[in-house]
Image (tube, helix red, strand yellow):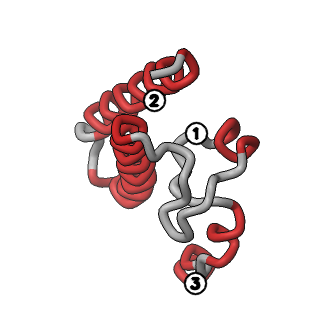
Amino acid sequence: MTIELAFLRLNLERARQHLIDELEMLKGYSSSVSEKLESIKNEKRGILSDIEHTLKKVDDGTYGICDRCGKHIETGRLEILPYTPTCRRCELKKPCIQSINDN
């Protein structure tokens, strides 16, 4: 494993643990803020899932390969969002479910 991948792994593992700690902390809040907290927890669970998926890709040598099209993910995109599973082109093709849910 190169130094960059080792550094990436370390950062992803730290981010993963931080999210796990935050999710654990959010368990104890009252039901009055429950709906908003559930939204926050779901978002954090999604990021945690992406990080765990990325750690598996680092281990199996496929880090940086788009899950949809199989092409390389742009370096700049990986620098900004190291746990992204898709290239920019495939991400732009994804339907915007959030805007539908916001209405």
The answer to whether mark 2 and mark 1 are in CB contact below 8 A is yes
Residue 6, x across and y down, in percent: 47, 19
The answer to whether mark 3 and mark 2 are in CB contact below 8 A is no
Q: Amino acid at mark 1?
A: Pro
Q: Which mark is residue 63?
A: none
Q: Residue furthest right?
A: 76
Q: Mark 3 or mark 2: which is in front?
A: 2
| Element type at mark 3 | helix
Residue at the spot of label 1: 82
Tell me the residue at 51%/25% (across/down): 5
Q: Nearer the viewer, residue 99 or 75?
A: 75
Q: Nearer the viewer, residue 35 or 51?
A: 51
Tell me the residue at 57%/73% (across/down): 98
Residues at marks 3 and 2, CA–CA distance in whole angstroms: 31 Å
Q: Nearer the viewer, residue 3 or 100?
A: 3
Q: Nearer the viewer, residue 53 or 42?
A: 53
Residues at marks 1 and 3, CA–CA distance in whole angstroms: 27 Å
Count of all numbered marks drawn on residues in the image: 3
Residue at the spot of label 3: 100
Left or right of 70, for residue 61: left
Residue at the spot of label 2: 12
The part of the image, by quadrant, that contains residue 38 is bottom left
**Which numbered disc flags the more N-terminal residue, 1 or 3?**
1
| Element type at mark 2 | helix
Tell me the residue at 48%/62% (across/down): 67
Disc 3 packing (10 Å; few <14; some 14–19; many ≥20): few
Q: Amino acid at mark 2?
A: Leu
